[in-house]
Image (cartoon, rainbow, N blue to C red):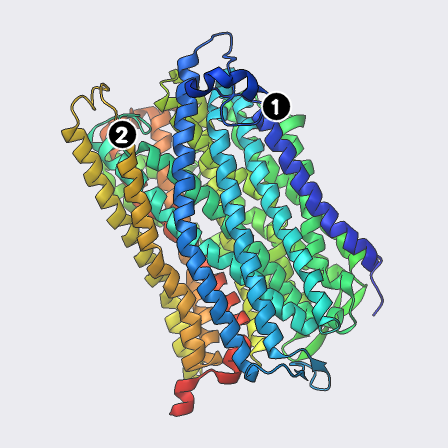
Amino acid sequence: MGAAMLSEMATEIVVPVCAVIGIAFSLVQWVMVSRVKLTSERHASSANSSKNGYGDYLIEEEEGINDHSVVTKCADIQNAISEGATSFLFTEYQYVGIFMIAFAILIFLFLGSVESFSMKSQPCTYDKEKMCKPALATAIFSTVSFLLGAITSVLSGFLGMKIATYANARTTLEARKGVGKAFIVAFRSGAVMGFLLAANGLLVLYIAINLFKLYYGDDWEGLFEAITGYGLGGSSMALFGRVGGGIYTKAADVGADLVGKVERNIPEDDPRNPAVIADNVGDNVGDIAGMGSDLFGSYAESSCAALVVASISSFGINHDFTGMLYPLLISSVGILVCLITTLFATDLFEIKVVKEIEPALKKQLIISTILMTVGIAIVTWIGVPSSFTIYNFGVQKVVKNWQLFLCVGVGLWAGLIIGFVTEYYTSNAYSPVQDVADSCRTGAATNVIFGLALGYKSVIIPIFAIAISIFVSFSFAAMYGIAVAALGMLSTIATGLAIDAYGPISDNAGGIAEMAGMSHRIRERTDALDAAGNTTAAIGKGFAIGSAALVSLALFGAFVSRAAITTVDVLTPKVFIGLIVGAMLPYWFSAMTMKSVGSAALKMVEEVRRQFNTIPGLMEGHAKPDYATCVKISTDASIKEMIPPGALVMLTPLIVGTFFGVETLSGVLAGALVSGVQIAISASNTGGAWDNAKKYIEAGASEHARTLGPKGSDPHKAAVIGDTVGDPLKDTSGPSLNILIKLMAVESLVFAPFFATHGGLLFKIF
């Protein structure tokens, strides 16, 4: 079959070096963001000592003016947001930590019991003539890799949040010097998160493989089966991060909007609104920490799915280490490509006017995709033999290296298509959102009808893109093809996350400008940054959902192979009942998360109304609102409400696999995948469209928009109601669903040995 041109030694060097380059680049970006200085009054005395440091309190230069009060306000607001976000995440991680330890014990007990905790070697699953390491070893190493994935996921979300809260006031202050300066600070900050996450995820996975190899030796089947725990750990943390953060941010957002904008007719981030700090904290814990953990989970799972399938193919059988690490080589090149792409936004071209912001972000996607296509071609040519075999449901299928290149390429370009379709349906520069805005003339009801129709329609092209990716990649390289197609979609994750994190940073910057009492001119610039970020956030969610569909299908294929299922026949009762129940699960999950947002928002609305009615002088701006109570309401509600949806997702595979067996579980996974993807795309796009329809009316940038405005008009109030309805759809239920479908699949794969041996208890009894 031939050998790869890239030697094993070269592979051992290339992967960690690229990861270290990514980490170093993120640190360079952080240092450059730190050059924007902030000074708070309480640190004024130590200003000289802190000027040369990189602390939170730095800047006196003020575009020719020396306005200390504005800078001080910005610093204090940033501190309040940062403290609120840190406090929430620490509280959330305490609960998640308990779950993490409990689930790790569960993994050990379930997998260890497969061979009654025996330490004896056993025949390999796919080659009975060879002897593999004992099941107890798989249990121990799967538990360790689960904990590694969970810790890396938590760290990714936390670091992203810290960087975003560090950058928001700096973005506000740079907006005084022009929209281009503010854009660069926000984008550099997003890049810090993107590169840290991509590089950390790659480095930890690479180190884990090499450490596990010291014990497993030639038993690569057992080694890469144990590594799947890494993906499970990453996604289980992401689920709680996404759901908890989503409930937090939307409870605050809905409360702030309904009372502040609709009832009291005050601006979105007016400091008189008691929920405004909680709203800004929510942007960071939901859209930054949650999204970071989510995309890390997708990356970890697609890598694990590809490694598991490759380990029982010619790469694993022949112990071709370079071929085995092909998924990691793709991610390594992705870091280098994203590094070059980032320079186009921050160094090679400068944004001078507002209308250049959105095209600059879109160019990031196009440039990274084109460069990555070349990168994939080079990696495939030097890292993979001219032909090799891939395990395909019991038989080995011969694959050419150019076919593998097409598998990765089709995933990469499908991601770009999904991104642009999402942008078309959620950006107020195009007719779909403008039609939704126009429907506000006749009230909130027609706005809701148009928004729902837009969301359903926006599913069509992404589903065709995913379907074509699946057909092409499966035809060429079976389930391995689908796994690497998902990796292709995620190969530019550093750029995707930079664009995604840019949105909440800009949103916070606008809020800080409003609360600090900065001029209308500054607020217009931050609003323009935020509007572009709103669209890019929708693009990020589109990428996450599309990649989740491919990842979960690849994991499904690995599960079916590991559980020794030859065919999944939907006409058999065992499979069909699983299929129909699985298709119901995304609806059950969405109902739980949306009701959670509604309950939390209800408490928030009551509290905001209470403060406006009982605090003398609050509406006139003479008294300060009680921000801390609103922050506490969001924190308590999100921690309490994230547990039931999380339990639903985590317990379903365990219950179904144990009591009904692997055939029924395969039906549940297929049903959840098919319905979950559709609901996730429509929910995210509907919410995004309503949000931008509201912003379209508020900005009044065109003649048509001005006929619907100004703020406070009846069409604007209808648009705010639509935006409020869409908030939990686009920031809680929609983005969380992609974690549901891939988490259930990776959990099923990790527990597959137990289900195959002891599963189906009810059918055995009857």
* Pointers 2 and 1 in contact (C-beta within 8 Å): no
* Residue at screen point 53% across, 42% down: 159
Q: Quadrant of the C terminus?
A: bottom left
> Residue 745, position in %: x, y?
50, 67
How far from the left and from the top, in percent, is residue 326?
72, 59
Q: Secondary structure at mark 2?
A: loop
**Mark 1 crowdedness (10 Å alpha carbons): few <14, some 14-19, many ≥20:** some
| Front residue of 201 and 147 | 147
**745 and 524: which one is in front?**
745
User: Does residue 615 appear left or right of residue 101 in this picture?
Assistant: left
Q: Is residue 683 visible?
A: no
Q: Earlier in the sequence, mark 2 or mark 1?
A: 2
Task: Give, as a three-letter code, the residue at label 2.
Answer: Asn
Q: Quadrant of the N terminus?
A: bottom right
Q: Secondary structure at mark 1?
A: loop
The picture places residue 456, in percent across and down from the top left corner, at 38, 52
Q: Is residue 188 above or below residue 600?
A: above
Q: CA distance from mark 2 to mark 1?
A: 36 Å
On residue 329, which mark appears? none
Tell us which disc is closer to us: 2 or 1.
2
State the mark number for residue 273: 2
Mark 1: amino acid: Glu
**In the drawing, does residue 616 fall left or right of residue 95?**
left
According to the image, label 1 marks what residue? 350
